[in-house]
Image (cartoon, helix red, strand yellow):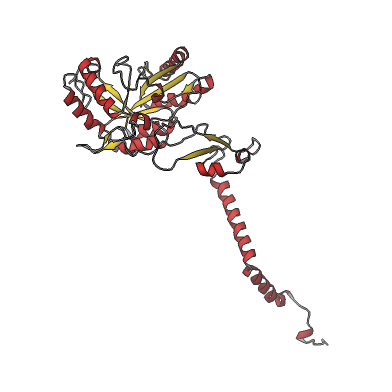
Amino acid sequence: MFSKKSAASAPATPERSRPAAVAQLRAAVANPYVGASGAAFLFLATLAVLVMIIGDPQAGAPVVRLPLAKAVVAAAPPGWREALTMDGAGPGVTEEVFELSEAPVEGELAGEAVITLPGGPGRSRVPLPPAPIAGLSAPGPNGPLPVIAPDGRTPAEAYARPFRSNGKPKVAIVVGGLGLNARATRDAIERLPGEVTLSFVPYAEGLQGWIDLAREHGHEVLLETPMEPVDYPDNDPGPYTLLASSGPAETTKRLEWLLSRATGYFGLTNYLGSRFLNADPAMAAFTTALKARGFAFVDDGQAAGRGMGIPRASASRIIDDQLSGEAIDEQLLALEAQALERGQALGSGFAYPLTIAQVADWAREVEQRGYQLAPASALTRR
């Protein structure tokens, strides 16, 4: 016979203890501290899984940019830079040095520190101030025209990339023909270091947008000026070409139309111009107009020694006259030799994909060989 026991005296079973366990779990989850900890754990676990799935260990290290206002830097506690370096094993801090004119600049000034993690890009991409800068433009018949500011600042000074010499031979490169081919233009802006000067065609669609993008990547900009070649009109540079036979008034009128296409460039460069550049009256009118508006003139070598009285520079070599990698490399090495002899050298080229690639590769190593890569504006002389 089997004896019967009351439910109260029966031993507890897993089924009977489940309601109590569920109640305890609900109470724990209801605790805000437990809930927050659990959510944080789930977030971190999910993030780790995503990094393992989509992360590319060969993609290179990220670059962290922190804009630091001058007041913040001044108020920072001692040792903040050392803390960022983590005893030499962590991220480092580099600074862009700006040479400011004596004239005051409107608005609040702020510096930008660029932190590059180990393995990341070696060069900083400090953007140049957006154009137009206040006081440097005025309404014209075809659009805004550049002018010298009331305080004396010129576009040549305000829109040039800041530069400080370190005493080493300076080498500068101008890459032109930009704005017509979108792929080549973006490639030049994004692949070339900010020290490389870029020149844009005035007829380019969306010209101001391209100039703005170039300045965001740290490039100073030149505007290409169509000038009459010896075989004109068979070889026509385009609308509003500056003609050797024009009088000063006509030259100024055509030039103002070209200048009104966009803003943000520190000077002009020639497109063709073998006849115009060698005509004294034409060059005198051109130089006078540039001086009145505060511009520099950087030519491709055809006008060396001409157009004085304004900030001037002339290229000594066209680096891609022969379109091969070996020939371009030889021209770049020749520029280094000239810089070693004379203290500085300027080369120019066209935005061919090969030219962009060769200059980008060369620029990564030129400073390791004892030279300083400089913007073209740093080589201009009056």
Across and down, in percent, residue 157 comes to: 37, 29
Residue 69 in sight in this render: no
169 lies left or right of 209: right
Q: Quadrant of the N terminus?
A: bottom right
159 lies left or right of 39: left
Across and down, in percent, residue 363 comes to: 47, 25
Question: Of 219 and 31, which appears nearest the observer?
Answer: 219
Q: Residue at x 33, y 39 (%)?
A: 134
Q: Residue at x 49, y 39 (%)?
A: 112
Residue 74 in sight in this render: yes
Across and down, in percent, residue 81 comes to: 60, 38
Question: Of 127 and 118, which appears nearest the observer?
Answer: 127
Q: Work out whether 205 lies above or below 324.
A: below
Q: Work out whether 278 lies above or below 357.
A: above
Total marks drawn? 0
Instruction: Identify the residue at the far top of this view.
Output: 341
Across and down, in percent, residue 202 comes to: 27, 31
Image-quadrant location for residue 161? top left
Question: Of 107 and 119, which appears nearest the observer?
Answer: 107
Question: Of 131 and 197, which appears nearest the observer?
Answer: 131
Image-quadrant location for residue 153? top left
Image-quadrant location for residue 172? top left
Q: Residue at x 19, y 25 (%)?
A: 251
Q: Quadrant of the C terminus?
A: top left
Q: Work out whether 10 lies above or below 305.
A: below
Q: Residue at x 33, y 30 (%)?
A: 154
